[in-house]
Amino acid sequence: MKILVCVTSVPDTTTKIAFTDNNTRLNKAGVTFITGPYDDYALARAVELKEKTGASVTVLNVGEADTEPVIRKCLAIGADDAIRVNAEPTDAYFVAEQIAAIAQETSYDLILMGRESIDYNGGQVHGIVGEMLGIPSISPVMLLDIEGDTAQITREIEGGKESLEAKLPLVLGCQEPIAEWKIPNMRGIMTARTKPLKVVEPTGTDKLTTVDSYELPAPRGAVKMIPAEEAETLIQLLHNEAKVI
Amino acid sequence: MSVLIFAELDEGKIKKSSLEAIFYGAKVAEMTGTSATAIIAGPADDAELASAGRFGATKVLHATDPKLTEPNGMAYATVVAAAVQQEGSKVIVLAKSSLADAMTARLAGKLKAGLAANVIELPDLSNGFLVKTSIYTGKAFAHNELKADIKILAIRKNTITPEEKDGTAPVETFTPALNEADFAISVKNTEKSSGDILLPEADLVVSAGRGLKGPENWGIVEDLANALQAATACSKPVSDLDWRPHSEHVGQTGIKVSPNLYIACGISGAIQHLAGVNSSKVIVVINKDADAPFFKSADYGIVGDVFDILPRLTEAVKAL
């Protein structure tokens, strides 16, 4: 079985976001970049499947050269090799096109990725890849088991979950609790240095969307504190002042 | 040419978030000098479908094929793509949801559409087609230019306040060719809490964290939520500990909500939790720790014991 895991390199979840160049670029100064948390779940499940069934795991990132530490970490966690498409991943259709182009060269049984990247939060790339390849896509996937050519899947839906069955190949957007996040060990870190990381140039499509500028939300006004002994006043304030109940 | 709105049903009724999408789509149609058509799949009676007219739709296409009874993102994408072709639509509007996400991506792939997810305002058409979206899990906004011929706008809850007017929209039965491959996934079992208010749809949310000390104490949270007709939610540690289901977890790696009111009980307010809730209109924080960081992001705060405060708030709501 061949598994492709697509990962994003994103600011750590604790990052205070700021912009630069007249609000046209993220200010990367002091920002730690990590593997997308949802992508990390996808990778962890892929490595578990590798350990269980001997599957091969290839990591794919669409990103510029500064994403390579994240890719090396994925290799240290247990992926066999990696591909980086040398382009800024700013448009969902564009990114999906790059992934589909790689997937058309090698036929993967499973293409896994996070349910969404935590920078743009679109949650669309897996579905577009599925459409481009003409195979089913499912997201957000909470449980994944493979028996032969059939996948047993649990997907979260609003207010609950559903159990699904589908034949491979599939594209899946993953989330917890599909697997526990894996932390690379020393041997993994050493071997990751020599695992193959191929860099390819993007296939040429114009981006269908571009970001003109960014903006930070206006700060909330000062908090109005209500003494605990007068807690009931809160309900009056929500009713008469904020008018939300 | 028209604006096409993909509206979802919940037990035969148009979802509230979809009414918002219809109203938003009608506004875009007004701005671009065209009309707004809604496409709805699955069983619903004509009176319900025609009510889309009260929110600005001038026509409703009803996809009635029994194969579409169960929500299916891939099959719905095929239906919507056929409607886009029939109507010559250039802008497609829908409300974010798990079904809409599944549908939208496949549709964008079919139509090579420019896609904006988490749209929070009407578009700016003064120079091209600009839409404002929420990014970095609510920590920032982006002004996106959609350059493709066909544009898809997935709007977030509370993007626009729908205004109702008199009128109904004519309903046309829509029977496009379906694609067998769209039915390759078989649904074995669905577990859904019925009767409850769905968290992503809720106007009011009561959320609780580890300060509740254990799942057996959730009664006071549910009592307040019931009194307010609010949905219940929880923090990540609570869902990790299995005190509450994952579908209630709000935050960076859970559900993102933007209700009118978010009441956080016994949640300290880690940045990852704030990310999922900071688009709420009004935030109330109740915590016994006066130094809890959440107070800095709140509109109203009470320093106190949730076991004392929540039952009193419930009684105060009932007395309104």
Image (spheres, rainbow, N blue to C red):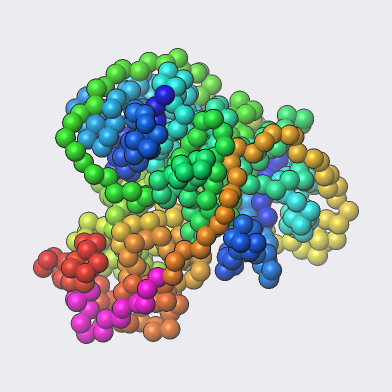
- The picture places residue B250, in percent across and down from the top left corner, at 43, 59
* Membership of A99 in magenta stretch: no
- The picture places residue B7, in percent across and down from the top left corner, at 35, 34
Front-most of A89 and B256? A89
Left or right: A71 in relation to B288:
right
Question: What range of the chain is rendered magenta?
Answer: A220-235
* Membership of A223 in magenta stretch: yes
Which residue, as the protein is rendered here, is positioned at the far left?
Answer: B319
Residue for point 44% across, 66% down: A218
For the C terminus of chain A, the quadrant is bottom left
Determine the image quadrant of residue B48: top left
Q: Is residue B5 visible?
A: no
Residue for point 12% across, 66% down: B320
Residue for point 51% across, 69% down: B271
Front-most of B1 and B21? B1
**Residue A187 vertical position relative to residue A207 in the rendered view, above or below:** below
Determine the image quadrant of residue A86: top right
Q: Is residue A242 visible?
A: yes
- The picture places residue A170, in percent across and down from the top left corner, at 61, 33
For the N terminus of chain A, the quadrant is top right
- The picture places residue B316, in percent across and down from the top left corner, at 16, 71
**Residue B223 vertical position relative to residue B160 in the rendered view, above or below:** below
**Residue B318 vertical position relative to residue A9 in the rendered view, above or below:** below
